[in-house]
């Protein structure tokens, strides 16, 4: 396995590939994404441990969507069982995926813990256990600072775990090593990932503006929220459909005698 160094414009190609894969199997990809969200939401409802359980399951569930994208790219119709791909590849890889989920949970809790230093834990409590969001809470400077701290800390954390589930599953990399290789791949191709992130943000903003302008022109501004929610979910499904391409292009499987290996690049 070696790391590919990609030009910044690759980020736009990933976005196009994700949209194209989604429309290749729109019913399957949207349905699987809704199932993905439903499973995590139901898990989070379990008293006391629900939110933690959802975090542990997230890497495995993400891998399931990546496997679905792989099948869609091959012209196949991904079935719902694809979401449990991580647990159908043998006990060793299933255990490694659970370890990865545990590491993700620990890192995420550390992010929330650091954000709690800003507002006494209000943002962390709201995220983990839910609650009522009101104008007073959102306008609180400490709460806003906690949100920004969490967002800024989550960025490097996402680099650690971006490729990790796929590395653990498809390349049988140990969970801790997968974090290093994932972060290395994201950093080496930071230009492509920056274009990729900005491109998806631009698409979401443009979709919101288009919906707002259209509904206002029709004299029904209240419809905007009703339209924007399903549109956002479809865009999110497209986004998850594009993640597989970022992994496939970033790493190349080599015969055992080929060099250089990713650990040598590091």
Image: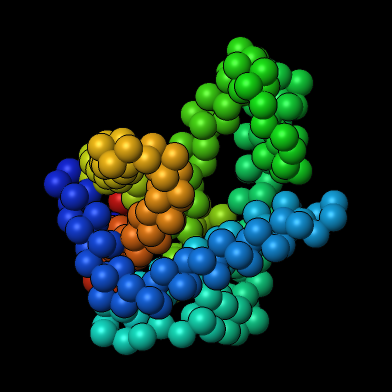
In the picture as drawn, the residue positioned furthest to the front comes out as 219
- Total marks placed: 0
* Direction from residue 200 to residue 164 in the image, left or right: right
Residue displayed at 57% across by 84% down: 88
Residue displayed at 74% across by 38% down: 131
* Direction from residue 185 to residue 155 in the image, left or right: right
In the image, residue 226 above or below residue 83: above
Residue 69 on image: x %, y %: 35, 72
Residue 257 on image: x %, y %: 27, 75
Residue displayed at 26% across by 85% down: 75
* Quadrant in which residue 91 is drawn: bottom right
Residue 61 on image: x %, y %: 55, 66
In the image, residue 165 above or below residue 207: below
In the image, residue 131 above or below residue 251: above
> What colouring style does the render use?
rainbow
In the picture as drawn, the residue positioned furthest to the top comes out as 141
* Direction from residue 214 to residue 30 in the image, left or right: right
Residue 27 on image: x %, y %: 38, 76
Is any part of residue 9 visible from this angle?
A: yes
Is any part of residue 103 visible from this angle?
A: no
Residue displayed at 18% across by 50% down: 12
Give the quadrant of the N terminus. Answer: bottom left
* Quadrant in which residue 135 is drawn: top right
């Amino acid at each position: 396995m070696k790391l590919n160094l990609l030009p910044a414009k690759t980020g736009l190609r990933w976005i196009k590939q994700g949209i194209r894969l989604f429309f290749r199997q729109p019913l399957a990809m949207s349905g699987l994404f809704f199932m993905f969200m439903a499973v995590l939401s139901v898990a989070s409802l379990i008293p006391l441990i629900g939110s933690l359980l959802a975090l542990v399951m997230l890497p495995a569930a993400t891998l399931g969507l990546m496997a679905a994208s792989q099948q869609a790219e091959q012209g196949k119709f991904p079935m719902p069982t694809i979401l449990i791909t991580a647990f159908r590849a043998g006990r060793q890889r299933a255990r490694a995926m659970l370890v990865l989920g545990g590491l993700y949970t620990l890192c995420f809790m550390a992010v929330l813990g650091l954000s709690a230093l800003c507002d006494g834990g209000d943002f962390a409590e709201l995220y983990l256990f839910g609650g009522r969001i009101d104008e007073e809470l959102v306008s609180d400077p400490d709460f806003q600072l906690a949100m920004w701290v969490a967002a800024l800390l989550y960025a490097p954390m996402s680099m650690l775990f971006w490729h990790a589930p796929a590395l653990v599953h498809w390349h049988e990399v140990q969970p801790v090593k997968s974090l290093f290789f994932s972060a290395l791949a994201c950093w080496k191709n930071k230009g492509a990932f920056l274009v990729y992130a900005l491109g998806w943000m631009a698409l979401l903003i443009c979709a919101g503006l288009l919906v707002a302008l259209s509904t206002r022109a029709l004299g029904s501004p209240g419809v905007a929220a009703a339209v924007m929610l399903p549109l956002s979910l479809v865009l999110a499904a497209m986004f998850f459909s594009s993640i597989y391409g970022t992994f496939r292009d970033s790493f190349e499987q080599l015969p055992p005698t080929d060099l250089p290996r990713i650990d040598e690049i590091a």
